[in-house]
Image (cartoon, rainbow, N blue to C red):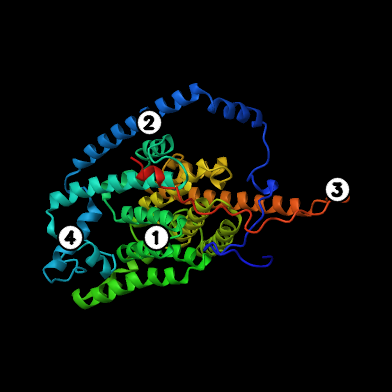
Amino acid sequence: MPGTIEGDGRGAPARSRLSASGSTHPPTALSALKGRWQRFRTTATASVVATVATVVAWGAAALTWTLQCLHDSRGGPNLGWDLVTCWRAERVFARGGQPYSLAATGHRLFLYPPSALLVLRPLAELSLHDVQLLGLAATAALMWAAVMISAAVLGRRWWGLAAALVLLALVFAEPLLAELSLENVTIICTFGLVAFYVLATRGHWASAGLVIGLTLAVKPLLLVVLLVFVLARRWRALIVTLAVPAVLNAVAFAVVKDPSEVFSKLPSLLNRSGSGVFLNSAWVDVLRTLGVPDAITILVRLATVALVLVVAWWSWQQLDDTPVRIITTSSVLLIGSYLAGTLSENHFMLTLVPLAMTAVVAGAPMRWLSAWIGVLLLMGLTPPGSLLGLNAPANLSAGRAFGMALVLLTVGAALGYRRLASRKARSAPLPDGEAPAEAPEGAGLQPPRKDALEGVLAP
């Protein structure tokens, strides 16, 4: 019916699929080469090459990950620093002590909300050695699962070449190496985010809200993802998302000794000091390290917020493919929180891996070359620190910030070009006597892929 909004649960109006807007970049001289490549892909030789490449990639990924985990397992007392901090707080909580007391936890700063003490309570039953080794194994397993499920959501086989290549590349990326060493609960948030993508893509928004709510109860890293529920107009799911951490924190405040002590620790997250400044890739510390005046830093942060809101809205409106739409919108919001917020650490970048993987879908903004330059930067492939006069940690942090900014600008440019091409196509004069074609109701929107995880469940 003209003038109505399609009830697909995503909150975006139905858009006609115009050929002019189906591509996010202008035609290039590589079109002939692409044609030959498409013809080659249909041959038997290509099938054999793809099979061999897939087997080799999975073997290489398994070998490199195993070697890296064995190397990290010999890290001694520093292995799993972040998880061990949680373990110490949980042991204190289990004995009725004050988990936020530095003296009680061996001067480890436990900064997670009181609800995290309830969710992570089983850690208290493990020994230090078990926590370190099981944490390392769980971190690796959850990351593997996140990559493989992301591939399935995007319409690729979970055991295919795309997933294998991503896993093989990740083992050389700074965010993954940091996460394996620290065993931070960011990996739980990353896996929860991928589970959210699965459920939201398949239309199970209440369950998706439950998953995000549980991650917020552990660590409020994915707080900005709540805006996706707003864009989708899934109000009940939003209530579920907010209710989960609210209820768990209410219970925690009743059973945890002095839970309000967490508020006295929060300033260390809102204003880093010492070496923490060099590890933070938020604008507030990156620009401070580069000597940028505070007034300009504030303007950059405000401009980042404005740009993120525009690009997120464009992502929700312009992208036709449902998984790419949800992943891109969520990732743009996360980039905004990392850049314009006060804290953005190395391992946070793992939540952007599904965004990079959308490059396997035709028409995705991440197919632009500049987006992949940004991905390389945020994953740790940075120029020498001498270029900016920074030490190694500060150089990596600056590289991550510039990489995220480049990805954000690229997505905005790709969607902006799409909008411009669509407007030109609509305003182009029609041949004499030809009436404008009326788009069928609901055209331009792909329904959620019901078979997105079919490969996971198949024998």
Relative to 403, say whether 88 is above or below.
Answer: below
Task: Say which of 175 and 355 sits in front.
Answer: 355
- Identify which amino acid the numbered label 3 is placed on: Pro
What numbered label is drawn on residue 431?
3
CA separation in Å, label 1 and label 2: 35 Å
Identify the residue shown where x is 52% and y is 49%: 407
* C-alpha span from label 3 to label 2: 53 Å
The answer to which image quadrant residue 62 occupies is top left
In the rendered image, which quarter contains the N terminus? bottom right
What kind of residue is marked 1? Leu
Which residue is rendered at x = 33% and y = 55% of the image?
Answer: 186
What is the CA distance from the residue labelled 4 to the residue labelled 2? 36 Å
- The label number, if any, that marks residue 122 in the structure image: 4
Left or right: 95, with 114 as reference point: left
Note whether 138 is above or below 314 in the view shown.
above
Residue of label 1 = 343
The amino acid beneath tag 2 is: Ala
Mark 4 neighbour density, 10 Å: few (under 14) some (14–19) many (20 or more): few
Q: Position of residue 205 (x, y in %)?
A: 43, 63
Mark 1 vs mark 2, foreground winner is 2
Is 257 drawn above or below residue 331 in the view shown? below
Q: Reading the chain from its start, which is encountered first: label 3 or label 2?
A: 2
SS type, badge 4:
helix
Q: Position of residue 355 (x, y in %)?
A: 47, 49
1 and 2 marks in contact (CB < 8 Å): no
At numbered mark 1, what does the secondary structure look like: helix, strand or loop? Answer: loop
**Contact, CB < 8 Å: mark 4 with mark 1?**
no
Residue ID at (23%, 46%): 136
Earlier sequence position, callout 3 versus callout 4: 4
Write down the residue under mark 2: 57
Ranked by sequence position, the earlier of labels 4 and 2 is: 2
Closer to the chain start, of discs 4 and 1, is 4
